[in-house]
């Protein structure tokens, strides 16, 4: 399981991504699709068209990490949006990776201070 530092943000590309991409290809997708700096230390999450594979790109000050997951059965309930990317919290990423549908889940009234840059 991933440990996500409190100051890290999680950006999810809404549209499908070619899962043949690795470090350099995903870095380019961060710049082109998510429009963020891949060297920021934030988590960037991508999924394929069938939604049965995902990759996470992370810079840790000495190099890139690429985390990959392939489902043997079923699909990820990928976020839908008119925007090209959405930002999730650590709990929401855990829910997504655990196979739950974020669109149907709802958060109770709760104070959640956004992380500062």
Image (cartoon, rainbow, N blue to C red):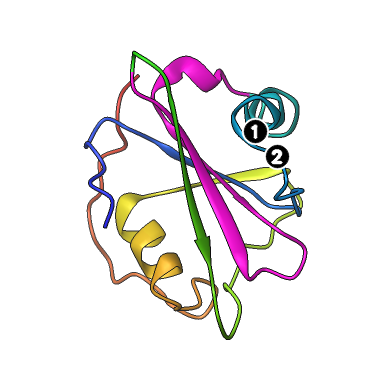
Q: Is residue 100 above or below residue 36?
A: below
Q: Residue 36 sits in which quadrant?
A: top right
Disc 1: which residue: 26
Q: Position of residue 76 (x, y in %)?
A: 57, 72
- Report the quarter where the C terminus lies: top left
Q: Nearer the viewer, residue 87 or 113?
A: 87
Q: Which mark is residue 21?
A: 2
| Residue drawn at 57 percent across, 85 percent down | 73
* Side (left or right) of 96 relative to 49: left
Assess whether residue 48 is covered by the magenta stretch: yes
Q: Is residue 83 above or below residue 32?
A: below
- Report the quarter where the N terminus lies: bottom left
Magenta region: which residues? Answer: 36-60
Q: Which mark is residue 79?
A: none
Q: Residue 106 sits in which quadrant?
A: bottom left
Q: Position of residue 15 (x, y in %)?
A: 75, 52
Q: Are marks 2 and 1 in contact (CB under 8 Å)?
A: yes
* Side (left or right) of 72 relative to 28: left
Please tell me whether mark 2 sits on a helix, a strand or a loop: loop
| Residue drawn at 38 percent across, 73 percent down | 98
Q: Position of residue 85 (x, y in %)?
A: 65, 43
Cα distance in 3D space between marks 2 and 1: 6 Å
Please tell me whether mark 1 sits on a helix, a strand or a loop: helix
* Side (left or right) of 31 relative to 95: right
């Amino acid at each position: 399981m991933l440990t996500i530092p409190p100051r890290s943000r999680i950006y999810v590309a809404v549209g499908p991504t070619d899962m043949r991409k690795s470090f350099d290809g995903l870095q380019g997708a961060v710049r082109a699709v998510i429009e963020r700096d891949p060297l920021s230390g934030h988590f960037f999450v991508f999924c394929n068209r069938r939604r049965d594979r995902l990759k996470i790109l992370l810079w840790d000050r000495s190099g890139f990490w690429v985390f990959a997951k392939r489902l043997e059965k079923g699909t990820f309930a990928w976020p839908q949006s008119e925007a090209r990317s959405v930002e999730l919290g650590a709990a929401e990423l855990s829910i997504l990776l655990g196979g739950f549908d974020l669109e149907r889940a709802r958060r109770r009234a709760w104070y959640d201070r956004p992380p500062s840059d």
